[in-house]
Amino acid sequence: MLRRAFIKRISGGVLLLSTAPFLYSCESKKVSKKLRFGVVSDVHYADRDMFINRYYRQSIDKMREAIDRFNGSGLDFIIELGDLKDMGTDKNPAQALGFLDKIEGQLQSFDGPVYHVLGNHDEDCISKADFLAHTSNPGNCKGKPHYSFKAKGVQCVVLDANFNADMSDYDCGNFDWTSAWLPKEQLEWLDKELASQPKTPTLIFVHQMLDSFSDIDKNLCVGNGDEAVSIIEKHPQVLAVFQGHHHPGHYSFRNGIHYWTCAGMIEGEYPDHNVYAVVEVRPNGDIFIEGFRDCIGGEFPRSMRQ
């Protein structure tokens, strides 16, 4: 559930912070220009029948609508937050790769850079290496499960929490979706990445949720997410964490950092339902999320650490 203490509904399905924290500006932490990017999550594309409220086949049409919108919105990049594909009922790897190729082709019809975050369903009957080989990130980010890049003066850090408790990779379904972990080496990398850019506004992207301190079900969260949050909170340039995994969406806030979970595109029958968003990071560090269709966005001001 979204925290009612922070938000209220207004027209167009947008949310505003109703008890916004104090704002501040710092010249050294300003975005050089307004950054705008598109977000989708939990697409789960597969050529299979509907199950519960998941319309697998329709995700291709939902994605096409989102890309059409993104292509006309002057965006700097788009990013999908994991679970881009799903699999057939017979768990056929070759078939699942065919699903991945098809939805990746639609995603790459965006006329700019496209970035990926690994989700658990991306390794449901294929390997992590298979997924990376059949998708493409720009430049030096290609083929990497976790990485960072810069856009319009903003540092973007992508994490991969698709590891078992013994720190082995999720691979061909050998995982429990309620148990996701960040290896020590990746946490150390995260700390170094953030320490290397102390005056650069920063966004974090991850599939499974980090805000286990909130009211969210802990099974949806990274098992050692508190370690990641402790690292993130050491670095005051971090503005927000963008997450997926929880299909209804979620929002929480702690110590000056917004945790926004994008709702799942897979949910609901098309054309009545769809979910995607455009995020705008402003020069003073404020964030505005324009949610389309069933997606809830809002105003997320840069705030002083408590």
Image (tube, rainbow, N blue to C red):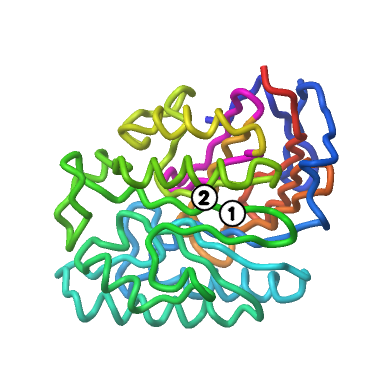
Check disc 2 and report its element: helix, strand or loop. Answer: strand
Calculate the distance from the C-alpha at mark 2 to the C-alpha at mark 1: 7 Å
Mark 1, other Cα within 10 Å: few <14 / some 14–19 / many ≥20: many
Q: Earlier in the sequence, mark 2 or mark 1?
A: 1
Indicate the position of residue 70 as horizontal and vertical percent values: 69, 70
Above-or-below relation of 82 to 219: below
In magenta stretch: residue 176: no
Residue name at image x 73 percent, y 29 percent: 8
Rendered residue at 42%/47% (across/down): 189
Q: Which residues are magenta?
A: 238-256
Across and down, in percent, residue 206 comes to 46, 48
Which residue is at 68% across, 22% downward?
305
Q: Which mark is residue 156?
A: 1
Q: Note whether 123 is above or below 5 in the view shown.
A: below
Q: Which residue is mark 2?
A: 205
Q: Residue at x 53, y 52 (%)?
A: 157
Q: Amino acid at mark 1?
A: Cys
* CB under 8 Å between discs 2 and 1: yes
The answer to whether residue 246 is left or right of residue 286 is left
Instruction: Classify residue 172 by image quadrant.
Output: bottom left
Which is nearer the eye, 159 or 27? 27
Indicate the position of residue 116 as horizontal and vertical percent values.
47, 64
